[in-house]
Image (cartoon, rainbow, N blue to C red):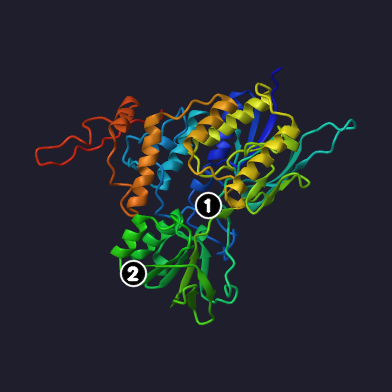
Amino acid sequence: MVSFMKVCVVGAGVAGLAAARELLREGHDVTVMEQSGGVGGQWLYDPATDAGDPLGTAGAHSSIYASLRLNSPREVIGFSDFPFYPKNDRGGDARRFPRHGEFLRYIRDFCDAFGLMDAVRLNTRVAHVGMAPRSDDGGFLGWEVRCAKQGEGNEVVTTEEVFDAIVVAVGQFTQPRIPTINGMDKWSRRQLHSHSYRVPDSFHGEVVVIVGCHESGKDIALDLREVVREVHISVKPMAGTISPGMSKAVSKHPNLHLHPEIDCLCDDGRVVFVDGSGVVADAIIYCTGYDYSFPFLDTAGLVTVDDNRVGPLFEHTFPPALAPWLSFVGVPRMVILPRFYEMQARWVAQVLSGRMALPPVEEMLRTVEEYNRAREAAGVPKRLTHAFGLDLELCDEFGEKRCGFPRLEDWKKELILSSITSLLDDAESWRDDYLDSDIVLEGLRSQGWLTGRSPHDKDDDGAAGERAPKPQTHS
């Protein structure tokens, strides 16, 4: 029997909006609580940073910096039935890897196209989510949600409401993960997490140490390179951390330097590395990732976060003891977005309506335990429990098995893999210097992404033909 529930979605970022759309499609009564003044989550760029707490989250929710461009091709990262086509206007960014503002505009267009704003309550911070008292027979009566809404004149109004089900979709990039380094509590110069980085201007002429060389570390180092005196990048001794492309950049620019891990920070401003070398620095930026954080959620210990493992979660989505009334959309990392969140959201919506069934609690718990043991046996750290490693086949299998989601087209898979190869080969120009294979070009043409000649075609002077994204609006 199909049933419809009153559902609260916490967060109006990509995961929350994916959840809202799928829940509405399934016929549920949906309310999305969003603490910011607009939708978009992380993509709602805020030039403010840290409100005096550069290693925490006292300021802005977003971790987006001004120069950030997408690191996945726009042809792949749109919602499955709402392509991220360039808009035919002068205000947009038609590049394959546009700046963050273009994706925010796309998210807003998605909301408008599917009427999602009617379900969204802006400037509404969820302060507490807890289980309502049990009925006399022990039955589950829902969730009490307490919110603080910003009204006119900075007046804060507190409200409480009961929902049948909660979907947590607050994202992954708000709570900075800070390393522990000997002497960092006494180092008196500027320290901040990449969460608080926005523009390079305030570092002009300085010596800056970057801790970490994954995507944000590379991007920020290259962003700073043009204005600082020196950038020193500290990297853990892990195989594959330094890509050939980043090594090329370091060899090309004399003010970029690579170092091993930091041993200690000294009172005089020196940063000492484990190989004994050191540098006197003006600032340190920790590009060390983020921790999952759900401070508003009270499950009486049934869901915990242990070294970035949220659990227990059946298929990274449902806590067995509280399923299906509590679910998480947006926990998996290194997956194709927002596509994977759509899969999760569709599954959640169908389970809540009764169209899809979950296994018994004991079986779900056993599955979680087996998964964790297998990951540990393979040497995967606990903090990477929810990292899929861009395993495209695994993502396809998840969608097919859980909600009948269509598989990703082969040309899109090839485009993703070729983009990763380009990133590894050239850290600086990979977003703008690429050459598509025939299978990718055919896929682009078949779905309206290209007009005109192939980039393989040559003019008389030997120049390649231009790529011409098809001008198309979402209306």
Q: Amino acid at mark 1?
A: Ser
From the top left corner, tell me how far across and down residue 152 is, in percent. Answer: 62, 48
From the top left corner, tell me how far across and down residue 332 is, in percent. Answer: 57, 42
Q: Quadrant of residue 348?
A: top right
Image quarter in which the N terminus is found: top right
Image-based side of 250 in relation to 143, left or right: left
How far apart are labels 2 and 1 at the CA level? Answer: 29 Å
Q: How many marks?
A: 2
Q: Amino acid at mark 2?
A: Asn
Q: Residue at x 31, y 64 (%)?
A: 251
Answer whether residue 118 is visible to the viewer in this image: no
Image-based side of 169 in relation to 438, left or right: right
Q: How many residues crowd mark 2 within 10 Å: few (<14), some (14–19), many (20+)?
A: some
From the top left corner, tell me how far across and down residue 137 is, in percent. Answer: 89, 30
The single residue placed furthest to the bottom in the displayed view is 268
Mark 1 element type: loop
Which mark is nearer the camera, 2 or 1?
2
Name the residue that disc number 1 marks.
62
Name the residue that disc number 2 marks.
255
348, 122: nearer the viewer: 348
Image-based side of 294 in relation to 131, left or right: left
90, 213: nearer the viewer: 213
Q: Residue at x 78, y 46 (%)?
A: 300
